Structures are given as C-alpha cells and as structure tokens.
Image: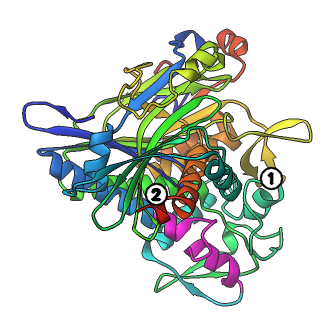
Amino acid sequence: MPSCSKSSIEIRRARPLLGTLVDIRATAPTTALAERAVRAAFAALDRVQALMSFHEPTSNVSQLNRQAAQHAVCVDGWTHQVLRRAKKMHAVSGGLFEITVAAALIRHGWLPRGATPRAAAAGCTTDLTLLPGNRVRFRQPLLIDLGGIAKGFAVDRAIAALRRHGATAGAVNAGGDLRVFGSLRAPVHVRRPESPGEFQLLTSVQNSALATSAPYYAARMISGHACVPIIDPRNGRPSRQSDSVTVQARTCVLADALCKIVWLAGADVAAPILRRYRATAWLLASNRSATQSTPARHAA
Amino acid sequence: MRHPCILLPAVLVASTSGYAVTYLTAAQAQAVLFPETALAPVARSLTAGETTAIEKSSGVRVRQRELHLWRAPDGGWLVVDEVLGKHEFITFAVALTAGGAVRQIEIMDYRESYGAEVRNEKWRAQFAGKTATAPLQLDADIKNISGATLSCRHVTDGVKRILATHALVLKILH
C-alpha cells in the first residue's frame, strides 16, 4: 500500500521468484519513480534467476554442469562474479562453503534429476577454474548449485537497481536473504525455529544485509532424522542441525555464504571468519528450554 | 571487537501468531499490470464440467467456481485468484497475453497464521470469495522477516490452474 510522507512515497510489491516470494519496498519522490525502481529491481532478480537457476536448462549453471568438464564455457559477468565469491568463501572456510553439492541434493530429492549428467563425487569447488573472458572450466565432472549465494547476489543486484533508478530508501527480502538501504532503519524479526509462526525481534538494521538459515519449511526426514538441504562437505550428507542461524554482513551474498559456514562450523570455529568480514551471527536454539538455560554469550 | 556470535536467549521472545501484508488492492493490481488500459470486467462462473476438466488438466484443485476476470482491449486477461496452504493464504493477480502466456504475476495479499486460527474452519471460511478488498491485519508491526517466507509452490500451482482455465474456458469466450 502506498504511504505518503512530506516528500516521498513508499510502495511495496511481491512476486514469486527464485523459489520464494520476493518482497520489495522502495521510497522515491513520486509513485511513478518508485514503480520504475521496483520494476528494475524485479528485472535484476529475473536476470539472476535466468542465469543461475539449477532448474532452467538454458541457465549458465546448467550449461556449466553439462559442458564445463569437456571445455571452457563462457558465462555472464554476473555468474563469473558469483563463482569468484564462491571460490573465495570455499577457501576462507577451509572447504566448508561448497557449491558442488547438486549431486547430493538430487540424491535426497531437493533438486530434480532432470537432464543433468552424473558427476564424480570426488570433486569440490577448487576443481572449478575461472579463466579470463568470463570463461569457466571444471577440472573434473562437477554438479554445481549456486542456491543461496545466487539468491543473496540477486538481492544485492536488486538493491543496486533500486538505487540506480532513484529510490532513496528500500528493502529487498527474498525468503531468508534481506537487505535494506537508505534512511530506512528496519527492525528485523526472525522465526523461532521450534515454532516458525512466532517471531522474535532480532535487531534493527540500516544499510546492511542479513541471511538466515533455518530448518523450518526446508527440512525433510531422511533415515529417521530431520535434515535440511545444506550438504556437509565433510561427509557429503545433509545437515541435521536444527537451530536457526542469522548473519549480518555488508552485502547479502556475503551474509548468505557466511550463514552457511556458521551453520556447518558452529559459532566458535566461524568466529575468525566473521571478524574478517565484520559480520555478526545470531543463533537461535530450536530447543527452547535448553536455550533458556544458556546465558547469552554476548548481549546484542 | 566484540564477539561476532550472539546466542539469543529465548526469554526475548515476543510471541505472535500471524503475519500479513497487503501489497495491492484489486484496483491497484489492474493499474500495475495493465497501466493506462481500460479493462472490462467479465462475469463468469465455471460449470461442473469445466471445473473437472481444469482440475484434470492442471492437477490443481479448483476451490472456487466464480472467476475474477478482466479483459484488455488487445485480448489479454487479468485474473485474480487465491491459494490456501496449511498456514498461508495468498491472493495474487496474473496478467495473461492474448495468446495465454503469463506476462506478469503480482502478489496482492499475503497472510499466514498458525495454531488455533488456521485449524479452525471459520478462519479458512472467512476467505471464501475474497479478492483482497478486505485485508485482515494479523500483525502490522512485523515488516521484515529474516528467514523463509512460506514456499511459493502454492502460487505456482495457482498459476497452473489459471493457465488451464485460459486454455479450456477463456480462449473460447466471446
């Protein structure tokens, strides 16, 4: 609903994209400008989906999975950028951040088998080589899924589009990946992992990004355990962690990648990596009684 | 620098049981999806035979036989539909080209609820026949949620149902 202040209008829109409902808010001097900025932001999200979706046979990700083990494949500059970020996060996390997880996600039913080739299970993100001219080569057959990191990148690009088209403040929320800019100081709530219909006020952010990984909605039972579609590269199996992890960072792509690292490594191991990126993590334990007996490690 | 990890105590929980956003009213959805176009409302209800055919073709249940339809001068359509999941109720608008392709989808209303209300048939019944003109405010204070919204699978199903409705009914409407 449009709302007016003295000299600016805020509009809010949502569309189904990137496998979730993407919610965009934009403030601009006029409704027409705000509408134009929101349209540009959705166009950026559409473009990321077309380039990086595992499901789209014509996406860069599908092309790479089919061909990059045979020859170098030329990709869009945006895809190259995300892959560079993925390799960096893989390196700084000692291999915990991993994008060659599609085979495991297919095996457990989170991704469709489709027409994807079978890949050797031995490879990892290090076997993906970035070449000049936005080209990419796999040193051995790999199946990559950019999942959350692409969604985080999409949110960053949508924010850039809002700014470029004259929005003075705004927010983009793509199911777990959230970024706000401008004068908007936004209180942020998270769902309680044990009861996702209940919200907890987490923090309030301005010109910042947040990503949350949590078991609700995504978990499924595998061999009697609730598992989430985050593959632990140490054993190749879906994670059974049941807490909710939120990371705040400068950009959403960074927040999303760091969130996966905290999820898998735990807060203590991930602390130096968080410090390096000036990021903060929040953990919400799924067992409420256990959480109550645990004192806050640090007040917010 | 402070420790970068914060374990939140559960005592901070502010318990709420719902979340709702109104994005567009029916009139706003028309203006956003068909700017500067005069749309003509079309009154049409599905027959029992059409309902069965749409369900068979789309694999999605038809909850309401009454269609919320507007026609554009170029033969395009605006369809307002709603989907009801276990916890969520979503009203959305789809712009179709004259050929029946999806041009744009906009969410009009998103509401979710847990616990007593959603189990209660009355909670569900209040949405029968609604087209986002009377939004129900469950919790207006919660604007930014970090953490998943419910999946958009139901909206995807709803769009499938609309495409089947176009192919079987709208395409041959005069």
Residue B101's disc number: none
- Residue drawn at point x = 76 percent, y = 57 percent: A105
Check the picture and name the quadrant holding the C terminus of chain B.
bottom left
Type of amino acid under label 2: Phe
Q: Nearer the viewer, residue A177 or B54?
A: B54
The chain under label 1 reads A
Magenta stretch in the rendered image: A48-69
Q: Nearer the viewer's eye, disc 1 or disc 2?
A: 2
Left or right: A53 with respect to A236? Answer: left
- Residue drawn at point x = 60 percent, y = 72 percent: A61
Secondary structure type for disc 2: helix
Q: Is residue B114 above or below residue B74?
A: above
The chain under label 2 reads A
Q: Nearer the viewer, residue B91 or A212?
A: B91
Residue A153's disc number: 2
Q: Is residue B114 above or below residue A171?
A: above
- Residue drawn at point x = 37 percent, y = 57 percent: A42
Residue A234's disc number: 1
Type of amino acid under label 1: Arg
Q: Is residue B55 magenta?
A: no
Check the picture and name the quadrant holding the N terminus of chain B.
top left
Real-space Cα distance between discs 1 and 2? 26 Å
Q: Nearer the viewer, residue B34 or A275?
A: B34
